[in-house]
Image (cartoon, helix red, strand yellow):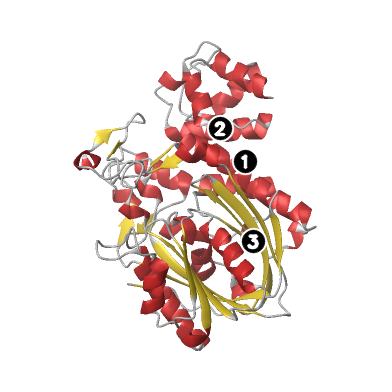
Amino acid sequence: MPFFNIENVKMVGVSACVPKNIEDNISYPYFAEGEAERVIASTGIKQRRIANSETTSSDLCFEAADKLLEELKWNREEVGCLIYVSQTPDYILPATSCILQKRLGLSQNCLVLDLSIGCPGWIYGMNMISSLMSHGSIVKGLLLVGETPSKYKSYKDKSSWPLFGDAGTATALEFDKQAEPLQFFIAADGYSYESIIIKEGGFRFPFRHESLEEKEDNDGMVRNALQSRMDGMSVFAFGLKQGPAAIKELSSHFSIDINAIDFLFIHQANMYMNEKIRKKIGISLEKVPYSLDVFGNTSCATIPLTMVVGAGLDKFRNGFSDNLACAFGVGLTWGSLYFKTDKIKIPELMEI
Amino acid sequence: MEKFIELFAEQLDAMSEVTLNADTRFRELDEWTSLVALSIIAMVDEEYGVSLSGNDIRSVNTLGELYNLIQEKL
């Protein structure tokens, strides 16, 4: 079991940016009579933000990062690494982190890296960046985590389209010998790689004209081969099992008292599933903040986005707090993180 | 088996008057939706500690077969 205890790195700020454009699930045209109400009641997702055709995940992350750097009053020359987590890169190549380095005006003495991770992307990214920074060669680091699922979902797929939204986030970290350790549990099940997949457009099945043909898939949904398909039942069962397990594994390995936790950030999949997970872990409702009601599932961005917009987070925003996070998704991949924060910088949510 | 059918019925719409038994082909019910499927997965996880995949649900036709599958996985 991969557990990590990473010292000398602390989280000092988090910010998020979403598209201005709001889409309401109540008026989604592919629902049957009464279906919108049922789906909203069970998923908890009322509306989502959808990027326009010119805006990419990196644009949203750029705005979030630019604002955070400004508010932290960081000297941009000091940023020693930038990790960009997304599955919607700007280009096949070069890596989007190179483009973000330039746009943010960072030094050339900066390690840049793209990570292709879905929903647990923030936890995986935190694991990677803190591992890189814990030896002290890098004093300041930026973790940019963003996704625009609207770019690869079929609008006609009512099992998926109404659940997902677009968002970009930035998390700032500093080397600090006094920092409380970051404790991780990380896991993957590549045997189930087909559970959520975009079949064509990569290099296994390169883009061809037929890739654009819309077809009714065997789940009855209409999509083309460049759009994602998900075995919803299997992914639900996976999250229900591995989400709580990730928290239990972590807390038993590091002797973390779950009852003493201030906040548990659960990946914002849907309310029905998250409530099942919360109850299995046995943590009270007010300790579990949400962003999915108005932003939906923003993939890897859900946890940092929830830190920015979630209700009841005064203690997280203004004081010292004990936190847990857990996420699960495409890959399949999942993980959990125990981290303490002390008055971190959180700029207001940005919209572009 | 009776308890299982009762638990299964609880996941359906409360207005539903369908009578269920071991031979019911549950995926052909009017009430069978993707949301009901998810609630069955959650119910089986809670009540039996068994994790059903999408393929498991698609591999059986009747409630009796579904029940037997859960018993095998116990």
Please name the residue shown 46% across and 15% down the image: B25
Q: Mark 1 vs mark 3: give the one in front.
A: 1
Whether residue A350 is visible here, answered yes or no, is no
Q: Residues within 10 Å of mark 1 (few under 14, many from 20)?
A: some
- As displayed, is residue B27 above or below residue A307? above
Please name the residue shown 40% across and 63% down the image: A167
Residue A287's mark? 3
Residue A350 position, x and y percent, is: 40, 74
Three-letter amino acid code of the residue under disc 2: Ile
Whether residue B39 is visible here, answered yes or no, is yes
Residue ranking furthest to the top: B23
* Cα–Cα span, label 2 and label 1: 11 Å
* Label 2 with label 1: CB-CB less than 8 Å: no
Residue B41's mark? 2
* Label 3 with label 2: CB-CB less than 8 Å: no
Question: Which secondary structure, mark 1?
Answer: helix
Three-letter amino acid code of the residue under disc 3: Lys
- As displayed, is residue A114 above or below residue A270? below
Left or right: A205 in relation to B10 = left
- As displayed, is residue A199 above or below residue A174? above
Left or right: A208 in relation to A283 = left
| Between A243 and A41, the one nearer to me in the picture | A243
Residue B41 position, x and y percent, is: 56, 32
For disc 2, the chain is B
Residue ranking furthest to the right: A255
In the rendered image, which residue does mark 1 sit on?
A: A241
Q: Mark 2 vs mark 1: give the one in front.
A: 1
Question: Which secondary structure, mark 2?
Answer: helix
Please name the residue shown 55% across and 80% down the image: A345
Residue A164 position, x and y percent, is: 40, 52
For disc 3, the chain is A
